[in-house]
Image (cartoon, rainbow, N blue to C red):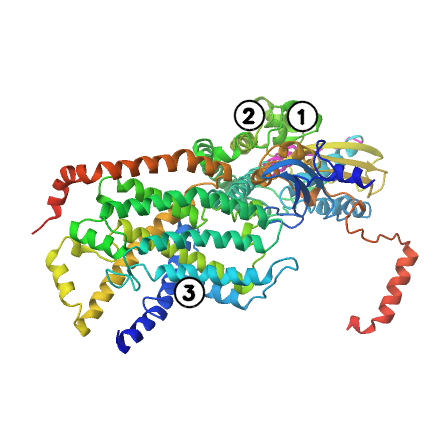
Amino acid sequence: MTAVWWILTILGILFFPGIGFCISIALFDEWIDRKFYAALQDRIGPEHAGFKGILQPLADFLKLLANEDIEPEAADKWGMRFTAIIGLAIPLVALLFIPIIDTTGLLSFEGDILLLAFLTTMIALIIFLAGWFSASKLAMPGTMRAASQLLSYEIPILLAMFAVALRTQSFSLAGIVQWQLDAHRPTLFSLPMVVFFLVFLLSSQAELERSPFDIPTAETEIVGGWEVEYSGKKLGFFRLSADLQMVFSAGLAVTLFLGGPTGVEMWIPSFADWLASIEGVSGLAVVAILYYTTMFAIKTTIIVLILSAFRALMARLRIEQFLEFSWKWVIPVTLGVFAITFFYVPWTDNVVWSHWEGLFDVS
Amino acid sequence: MADKKKIKLGSPQTGCSSCIPNTFEIPLGPQHPALKEPTHFLLEVEGEIIVNATPRIGYVHRGIEKLAETKTYSANLTLVERVCGICSHIHSISLANAAEAALALEGFEVPLRAQYIRTIVAELERIHSHILWLGVAAHEIGFDTLFMLSWRDRELTMDLLEDISGNRVNYAMNEIGGSRRDMNQSQIDRMLKYMDITEERMERYKDICINENTIRMRTQDVGILLPQKAKELCACGPTARASGVAIDVRYDDPYSAYGEFRDIFNVITYDTNDVFSRVVVRIIETVEACKYIKWMLKNIPDGPIFKKAPRKVPEAQILSRTEAPRGELIHYLWSNNTNKPYRLKITTPTLSNINTVPEMMKGDYLADSTITLASIDPCFSCEDRMITIVNNDRRKPKIETWSESQLRKYSNDWHAKNKRWKK
């Protein structure tokens, strides 16, 4: 642990690939989301701030920071401030574990997937507290909806994460990415993982409270739900937090199922060797970092596009319809496939998929 | 006394005065993102289930009826168009019909071409009103894509209205004794072309609404209004027709040019009695309206569009019924042989339909309250004819009644005290 290592790590956390980079990519993905959503609806979307409105999310955030911050008389004011800040901090912390510029995250240890599972649950808990502290009649149904929705999407998300961990025999994101590199294929192409990928996307949509699962914040039903009493800086923090959560969910999906920041070197061993060889070389390391970051950005954007299309295609469900859908269909199916993964896949995978692996095994 | 009040406010018969009431009240409005105009519903909810709803209207009283007594008939046509922002033309048709019916006592007759033009504009208005409603309803259930796409297609109709009348909202097409503007052949051709497109698009939306699962999940078995209840509560228009009650003024009591194509007219009803039924009825009505417009454009007679009417309307009391996009619209005109009405009473369809909303909401989920309210296509600004001050507010506001002289004295005193205010 030299001084240089410390300085690099702190700079990494603050700027690249830490807080600064994550916020930039979050705002960029919000722009992509809004533009694509608008295109699906035959609209133009953000247009004026920057190139094709690319700075609009940033402008919105800054505007919210400048707005008046109103706190209701009856609300727990410190509670509201506390939840707004924690709500922004949690996704930022979680993003530090996602591999972006390298096959390992900025922070990484064996078992970090458990910490991430804990953090995703914490985000939902913060939302519950945020609604609770604001002491509003309209926030209360939103809070209750958020809590009951949490119970029904959290289990599929955790099962999907642990299924990947089970398949790759690793409890760290770095290990999962390494397994995919070694196996010459993303986890998605492993036998039952397609199911878990779909379940993960579905549950992410619910966790991000986007249509058709925007039940806790339904604007036309309960006036914004739990965030109804938040304004100004606090609302800005929650909005930015939502963008960061979107990047986090997309990034986690990319890491777990699509090979993380790795790309074509999965199937071109010589390129992989070259990337490994320039790791230590200071001048060429920039090339590797740029390559990994680009791959990560492309894959994350694809996931965001899928989530946007999903958002445009359906009407909002009612809370009891969502619970029914989740408990009667998603959770049993996920549990069943999880059991199959646990008992049979390590055996069948070698038999059935050895042919598939052979296709990509160049060496 | 206190006990009595508690039982009345809180829940139920079983509740004792010491129990915590298991219902609580959620206000819907006057300001609410789902409401485009101010109104208030006090929803009593048990968890997510609505047990009771109390409407309160009267937030946008504008005194139009009183104002109408001070204006000539010609000016009143302009005034009543301002009653509603969406269905403006039907109000002026209704008043013109009333005045012309009184004039008919002296043998006055309106040219047929003018009646056709009025009817065409009225049906175009119905199309744009129904598509607007479809978009609003889609927005209420969180389906913004349908909202945006249907409003894009509404622009075709709006363009046509702008083309033939010069305006997008208040068309000013009517005059007592005929129509103000004629239509030429190129406008008729353009209308025929656009009506084909609109009809095709509406058929597509009908497919979407019938086949899309999430729309069905949100609208089926929601906001049930049984035919018996619809009759009891005086529902009208698409709300009544969606409950299987076949009433339509256009067919039952034809006015303007509706009598000309009564044999091809279909009264659209649907029998599931829920919000889905109202969606389907409105979409099919839009398709039908396109057909009527095409029929009228092909059969429009030649001739004058205006016949100068005498200024004074003979003494009569006329009840003029028309079918607005939202239901039966009633103009009651009392003329007294002058050029101004002695009394004009307007009853808009929303006033009839608003009583059905608590009935629809009872037993439904809180999440469905807005789509249920939207399903009657409410237009609150049109319906408010009077204000009643209700003093049952828990905060006990101070209410005083002032005479005009007191008010004038207060005004003079205030302006004497605040002289700088004028600058």
The tag on residue A55 is: 3
Residue beneath disc 2: B272
Residue drawn where x is 35% and y is 48% of the image:
A306
Answer few, some or many: residues within 10 Å of disc 1's Cα (few below 14, many 20 plus, some between 14 and 19): some
In terms of secondary structure, where does tag 1 sit? helix
| Chain ID, mark 2 | B
Q: Residue furthest left?
A: A363
In terms of secondary structure, where does tag 3 sit? loop
In terms of secondary structure, where does tag 2 sit? loop
The tag on residue B229 is: 1
Relative to residue B226, is residue B209 depicted above or below? below
Quarter residue B411 falls in: bottom right
**Which residues are the magenta region?**
B106-122
Residue A179, image x, y percentages? 20, 52
Judge whether residue B112 is colored magenta.
Answer: yes
Name the kind of residue labelled 1 in the image: Lys
| Chain ID, mark 1 | B
Residue B5, image x, y percentages? 78, 40
Q: CA distance from mark 1 to mark 3?
A: 54 Å
Answer few, some or many: residues within 10 Å of disc 2's Cα (few below 14, many 20 plus, some between 14 and 19): some
Relative to residue B367, is residue A70 depicted above or below? below
Quarter residue B339 falls in: top right
Judge whether residue A268 is colored magenta.
Answer: no
Name the kind of residue labelled 2 in the image: Thr
Principal SS element in the magenta part?
A: helix
Disc nearer the start of the sequence (1/2): 1
Q: Residue A362: tell me if it is visible.
A: yes
The tag on residue A65 is: none
Relative to residue B376, is residue A50 depicted above or below? below
Residue B233, image x, y percentages? 70, 29
